[in-house]
Image: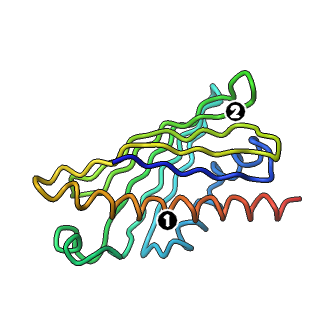
Amino acid sequence: MKLAVRHAYSASVEQIFAAHIDQQVREQACRQSGALSFQVRVQPAADGTVRVEVERVMPATVPDFVRRFVGDSITVRQVEDWSVPDGRGGRRADLRLSIQGQPATMAGTAQLSSDSDGCLEQITGEVKVAIALLGRRVEPEIVKVIEAALRIEQRVAEEWVRSRR
């Protein structure tokens, strides 16, 4: 199932990128998302790329038919591999998300680009749940959870940038 989240910021690409790779920003997003526990690792490389790894244990706030498969909590692992700026100053990340112990994944990209008001973030991906017969019913629920987490990350990033002006 397709995932698409778009968000406009009134800040520059570099400001939003800095927020996305800030350890404290990512930890705050985990707290605001209601994570029961979390671990964040930000790994800058010498070539200017950055890897962000976020692992969080979330309460299973999903319909009962999904909770039967996942239990009372869900451990979500998110990996972002951010590129160096492109010729126009934009940034791109390859995204991978998995739910530990479950056949649910998301692969996609995040693109930060300049627009007339600041920065536009476009996140696209494909969510797959490999459960015979039920996968198609579960995928929309997983998409909702991912979209909610992304919206929290975007809000926390925006607040962080505003607090530094």
Q: Nearer the viewer, residue 112 or 41?
A: 112
Residue positioned most to the right: 165
Q: Earlier in the sequence, mark 1 or mark 2?
A: 2
Report whether 23 appears left or right of 161. left
The residue that disc 1 covers is 148
Residue drawn at (69%, 32%), measured in percent from left and top?
90
Q: Position of residue 29 (x, y in %)?
A: 58, 66
Q: Does any portion of residue 45 appear in the rendered image?
A: no
Q: Nearer the viewer, residue 137 or 66?
A: 137
Q: Position of residue 140 (x, y in %)?
A: 33, 60
Q: Nearer the viewer, residue 38 or 111?
A: 111
State which quadrant residue 157 falls in. bottom right
Q: CA distance from mark 1 to mark 2?
A: 24 Å
Q: Position of residue 15 (x, y in %)?
A: 77, 47
State which quadrant residue 119 falls in. top right
- Amino acid found under the numbered disc labelled 2: Gly
In the picture shown, does residue 128 fall above or below 64?
above
Circle 2 SS class? loop
Residue drawn at (66%, 40%), measured in percent from left and top?
112
Q: Which class describes the residues within 10 Å of circle 1: few (<14), some (14-19), or many (20+)?
A: some
Circle 1 SS class? helix
Give the position of the C terminus as an image quadrant: bottom right
- Amino acid found under the numbered disc labelled 1: Ala
In the picture shown, does residue 51 fall above or below 55?
above
Do the numbered discs 1 and 2 sit on residues whose CB atoms are within 8 Å? no
Residue drawn at (74%, 65%), measured in percent from left and top?
159
In the picture shown, does residue 6 fall above or below 110?
below
Q: Position of residue 31 (x, y in %)?
A: 54, 73
Residue positioned most to the left: 132
The residue that disc 2 covers is 90
Residue drawn at (33%, 51%), measured in percent from left and top?
98
